[in-house]
Amino acid sequence: MDRKETYSRPQPAECLTCALDAGELLLAYGAEVSRVEDTIQRLEHVCGFEQVDVFTITSSIVATVRLPDGEALTQSRRIKARVTNLGKVAEINALSRRFCAGLLTLADFRQAVQDVRDERPAPPWMELLLYMVISFSLSVFFGGTLADGVAASLSGMVLFAMIRMSATLQMNSLLQTAICSAVTALAVLLLVGASIGVHPDKIMIGNIMLVIPGIQLTTSLRDMINGDTISGLLNLSEAILKAISVALGFALVLLAGGV
């Protein structure tokens, strides 16, 4: 298949839209800014644009391409919600590489990106099981007893239920984190009071690790190392605020309970 023949048919606006679709998913699922900008630039160069300028921060993408006749075309995307899903980041990367290698037409690439967007998430029971297993494992790993691990898995169920409920209500992320942490801490104290678990601090460690924004903090540092200082600082600020919300939620319940 002749690549020039493949990529000469689509309209410039369609090419730019398709590249931004891929960039939007990358950013929304936790990719660093440099990866988002590099992917969009590579896709647009393959489409035939010689000059491509992309500006990305944690909540927005702006891309401008210059057409052969000198006219400039600009599109932007607003990213309102971000989650961590490195599996989907890897899928988009693989698709962009196949497109740049000439193995996909633009229409096929756009449909594949849409398929990634429409993929059904893991079933709730599987996520719940992971919350329980991770809480149990981390509680025991950090010095808790088997009883503490069991209590951590039960409070992990409470944390999962609160996260799902608050997500349905579309609460502010910082408020959501604080409330979920507070309810989980209360559940831990009730479990210890019912003699299910011995050390509330070891139990809470297993739950806290589920909501600490470790990947986001790492991504912010990578952005700053790559020279994307603004995006790195924005991501770092959000990660620190989330960590403070987690600590505040647990601390308020512990102080109120006199622990």
Image (cartoon, rainbow, N blue to C red):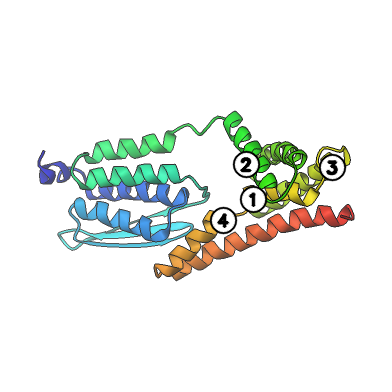
Name the amino acid type tagged 2. Ile
| In this picture, residue 60 sits left or right of residue 180 | left
Looking at marks 1 and 3 on the same chain, the residue that comes earlier in the sequence is marked by 3
Secondary element at tag 1:
helix
Looking at marks 2 and 4 on the same chain, the residue that comes earlier in the sequence is marked by 2
On screen, residue 124 above or below 31: above
User: Cα distance, mark 4 to mark 3?
Assistant: 28 Å
| In this picture, residue 49 sits left or right of residue 129 | left
Looking at marks 2 and 3 on the same chain, the residue that comes earlier in the sequence is marked by 2
Q: Are marks 2 and 4 in contact (CB under 8 Å)?
A: no
Looking at marks 1 and 4 on the same chain, the residue that comes earlier in the sequence is marked by 1
On screen, residue 216 above or below 166: below
The image quarter containing residue 54 is: bottom left
Q: Position of residue 225 (x, y in %)?
A: 43, 69
Q: Which residue is mark 3?
A: 192
User: Cα distance, mark 1 to mark 3?
Assistant: 19 Å
Looking at marks 1 and 2 on the same chain, the residue that comes earlier in the sequence is marked by 2
Name the amino acid type tagged 4. Gly
Name the amino acid type tagged 3. Val
Q: Position of residue 100 (x, y in %)?
A: 22, 48
Q: Which image quadrant: the C terminus?
A: bottom right
User: Cα distance, mark 1 to mark 4?
Assistant: 9 Å
Name the amino acid type tagged 1. Met
Q: Which residue is mark 2?
A: 134
